[in-house]
């Protein structure tokens, strides 16, 4: 399959490139800076709709995996990048006959006040600017799918860790730097290694119809459990424990993920 990946120079994009190549897909990319690759890469800003339209028209990808995004809620361009640019690329793709659009959304769309793993039908209560831009983009993409022949999959990715994801709590704990942790047993996260995320994204290329889908392990880790696990592996992170009593819960229900692609969860952390 011929797959266009936006955000191909990001940490997730780099790992996805390797997986797609390994599995025999033909890759296209979009990058703001020059890249020396053995496949076609458009050197353009994600907001340059004319260049992107010309590139898609010329290269005719079968699918687009849209990873490009701004993460910082204080970034003045976050709405323009995460919502407007996403919709613009998707509309262009639909008009030019691209058959599938996979959008890298976020588990943050659910917020963090749940009591049980979030199913895809759960209310979208994300309160950060970042999560709100993802919610807006998801809804716009579903609307687009209903009036065109392009299939849309909104992949709600939970907490990624692994090579390059230095802001991930697990990456911080595996580094030599001191990390502040909440000691509260009510601060719970669902962590998934970047290699498992790229595995899911590649398999979603074969999934038919429109879907919202959670991408996580469905396993909750509070910080005390996480520390115990790492110490049992001979890893002793430098930590500063905060005694603040905080409630923050973010775990994916992966029942649908298992049904769609046969996903099997990691019960442990890849501590390397």
Image (cartoon, grey):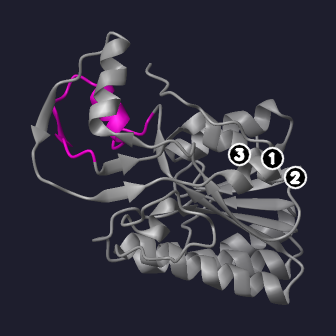
Q: What's the CA distance linking mark 3 and mark 2?
A: 10 Å
Q: Is residue 173 magenta?
A: yes
**Circle 3 — which element?**
helix
Q: Residue 265 in the image: state x and y as whole percent.
A: 63, 36
Residue 27 visible in the current orientation: no
Q: Quadrant of the C terminus?
A: top left
Pick whichever of labels 2 and 1 is earlier in the sequence: 2
State left or right for residue 52 relative to residue 93. Answer: left
The residue to which callout 3 is attached is 200
Residue at the image position 29 percent from the left and 27 percent from the top: 227
**Circle 1 — which element?**
helix
The residue to which callout 2 is attached is 206
Magenta stretch, residue numbers: 164-185
Res. 207 image quadrant: bottom right
Nearer to me, 1 or 253: 253
Nearer to me, 32 or 245: 245
Instruction: Establish if 137 lies above or below 105.
Output: below
Residue at the image position 75 percent from the left and 79 percent from the top: 92
Nearer to me, 243 or 5: 243
The residue to which callout 1 is attached is 261
Q: What's the CA distance linking mark 2 and mark 1?
A: 9 Å
Question: Which mark is in front, 2 or 1?
Answer: 1
Dots 2, 1 in contact, CB < 8 A: yes
Question: Which mark is in front, 3 or 1?
Answer: 1
Instruction: Establish if 55 lies above or below 47.
Output: above
Pick whichever of labels 3 and 2 is earlier in the sequence: 3
Res. 64 image quadrant: bottom right
Residue at the image position 48 percent from the left and 53 percent from the top: 251
Q: Residue 152 in the image: state x and y as whole percent.
A: 76, 71
């Amino acid at each position: 399959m011929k797959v266009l990946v936006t955000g191909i120079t990001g940490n997730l994009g780099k790992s996805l490139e390797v997986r797609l190549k390994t599995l025999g897909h033909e890759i296209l990319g979009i990058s703001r800076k020059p890249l020396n690759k053995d496949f076609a890469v458009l050197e353009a800003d994600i907001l340059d709709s004319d260049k992107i339209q010309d590139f898609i028209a010329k290269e005719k990808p079968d699918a687009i995996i849209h990873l490009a995004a701004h993460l910082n809620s204080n970034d003045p361009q976050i709405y323009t990048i995460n919502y407007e640019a996403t919709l613009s690329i998707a509309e262009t793709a639909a008009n030019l006959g691209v058959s599938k659009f996979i959008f890298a959304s976020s588990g943050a769309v659910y917020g963090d006040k749940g009591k049980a793993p979030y199913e895809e039908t759960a209310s979208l209560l994300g309160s950060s600017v970042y999560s709100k831009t993802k919610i807006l983009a998801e809804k716009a993409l579903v609307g687009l799918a209903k009036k065109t022949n392009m299939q849309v999959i909104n992949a709600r990715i939970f907490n990624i860790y692994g090579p390059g994801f230095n802001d991930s709590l697990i990456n911080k704990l595996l580094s030599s730097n001191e990390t502040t942790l909440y000691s509260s047993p009510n601060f719970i996260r669902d962590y998934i290694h970047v290699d498992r995320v790229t595995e899911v994204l590649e398999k979603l290329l074969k999934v038919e119809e429109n879907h919202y889908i959670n991408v996580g392990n469905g396993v909750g880790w509070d910080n005390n459990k996480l520390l115990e696990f790492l110490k049992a592996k001979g890893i002793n992170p430098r930590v500063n424990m905060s005694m603040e009593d905080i409630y923050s819960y973010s775990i994916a229900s992966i029942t649908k993920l298992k049904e769609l692609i046969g996903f099997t969860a990691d019960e442990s952390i890849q501590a390397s």
